[in-house]
């Protein structure tokens, strides 16, 4: 029985000790909570925000400025509010940059922004409180602080309807300066230069009559041509298979002769154009036929790659000799030769 009571007393003492420890833990938790809340509330109380306007009364179309500012302890992150383009009928005209100002002791940062408004409708407009959000260092939760509401009055311009309507001001005559006229002067000069250039290009592009300048040889044209034909005959080009070179040489000699003899630019003309320029009484029919045969055969060899037979090659050279003899100028030596033969 005595041992039983001893056990009960011991168990009671243990219960009392456990209760004391629980009370101490609860008191510690309560004090920690109160300390954290007090520090959090202390930081929150040190954050301030303000919105101020430079006037509370404007006329339609005038502007006014609102200064937004917020001060937070160093290390606290501030989320500056974004003001919309209009608050009711108050329209935002301009926004300044957000400036940061540090206190002298470095414990506070102040953020400021200047916003310019205007309004084109009369009435009373309330600018609702603007909320700033901030976040303490090491915490994920955000707190907020708001500005006070502002009242703006917009009035119309009074109009006296009993008076006649008058013009505000007469137009002012502003004299023209040189810099204002200079672009037009420069444009006119450039236009004139452009027209002159175009006219010159048109004139140059028009086909002009070509003046043929033929060099007068020291010897008569027929003598030079006969010497050149003799040299070509001695080369025996067509015997070696050089048909194109042979007929080109013969036709070029005859064309050069025509240029010097008749002042016709035969080297630049086609065969048909050369024959056309030698029409009429310039040469007789026999000389014309020999020239036509010679030139056409040369064209066939040069452009159609024809290969004439031996007779045609010899006939081309013979026609060249005959054409020169039929068209060369008549001299006193020709009459002496006829008298001697008679």
Image: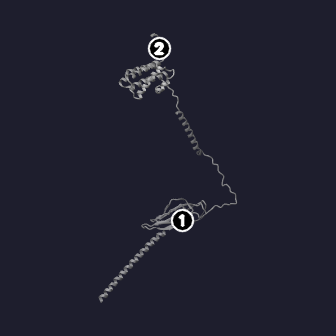
Q: Give the quarter of the figure containing the N terminus.
A: bottom left
Assess disc 2: are there few (<14), some (14-19) or many (≥20) residues with their C-alpha within 10 Å of its C-alpha: few
- Indicate the quadrant where residue 250 lies: top left
Observer-side mark, 1 or 2, equals: 2
Query: Where 112 sits versus 29, above or below?
Result: above
Q: Nearer the viewer, residue 29 or 248?
A: 248
Alpha carbon distance from label 1 to label 2:
127 Å
The answer to which of marks 1 and 2 sits earlier in the sequence is 1
Residue 291 visible from this viewpoint = yes
Q: Nearer the viewer, residue 117 or 124?
A: 124
Residue named by callout 2: 334
Identify the residue at image location x=42%, y=75%.
31
Query: Where 31 sits versus 305, above or below?
Result: below
Side (left or right) of 124 relative to 299: right
Q: Name, please, the residue furthest toward the bottom.
A: 1
Image location of residue 317, percent across then percent down: 41, 21
Residue named by callout 1: 51
- Indicate the quadrant where residue 122 lies: bottom right
Identify the residue at image location x=44%, y=72%.
37
Assess disc 1: are there few (<14), some (14-19) or many (≥20) residues with their C-alpha within 10 Å of its C-alpha: many
């Amino acid at each position: 029985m005595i041992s039983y009571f001893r056990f009960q007393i011991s168990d009671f003492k243990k219960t009392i000790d456990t209760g004391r420890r629980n009370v101490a833990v609860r008191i510690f938790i309560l004090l920690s909570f109160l300390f954290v809340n007090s520090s959090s509330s202390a930081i929150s109380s040190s954050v301030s925000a303000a919105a101020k306007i430079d006037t509370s009364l404007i006329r339609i179309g005038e502007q006014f400025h609102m200064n937004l500012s917020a001060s937070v302890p160093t290390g606290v992150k501030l989320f500056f509010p974004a003001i919309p383009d209009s608050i009711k009928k108050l329209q935002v005209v301009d926004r300044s940059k957000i400036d940061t100002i540090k206190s002298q002791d470095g414990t506070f940062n102040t953020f400021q922004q200047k916003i310019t408004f205007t309004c084109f409708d009369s009435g009373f407009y309330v600018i609702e409180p603007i909320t700033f959000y901030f976040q303490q260092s090491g915490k994920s939760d955000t707190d907020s602080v708001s500005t006070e509401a502002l009242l703006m009055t917009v009035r119309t311009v009074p109009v006296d309807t009993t008076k006649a309507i008058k013009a505000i001001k007469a137009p002012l005559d502003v004299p023209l300066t040189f810099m204002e006229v200079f672009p037009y002067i420069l444009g006119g000069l450039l236009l004139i230069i452009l027209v002159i250039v175009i006219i010159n290009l048109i004139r140059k592009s028009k086909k002009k009559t070509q003046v043929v300048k033929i060099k007068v040889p020291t010897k008569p044209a027929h003598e030079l041509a006969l010497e050149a034909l003799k040299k070509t005959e001695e080369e025996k080009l067509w015997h070696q298979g050089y048909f194109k070179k042979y007929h080109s040489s013969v036709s070029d000699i005859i064309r050069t002769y025509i240029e010097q003899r008749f002042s016709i630019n035969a080297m630049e003309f086609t065969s048909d154009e050369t024959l056309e320029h030698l029409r009429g009484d310039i040469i007789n029919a026999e000389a014309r036929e020999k020239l036509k045969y010679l030139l056409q055969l040369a064209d066939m060899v040069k452009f159609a790659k024809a290969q004439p037979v031996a007779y045609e090659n010899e006939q081309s050279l013979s026609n060249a000799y005959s054409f020169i003899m039929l068209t060369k100028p008549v001299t006193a030596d020709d009459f002496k030769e006829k008298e001697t033969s008679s």
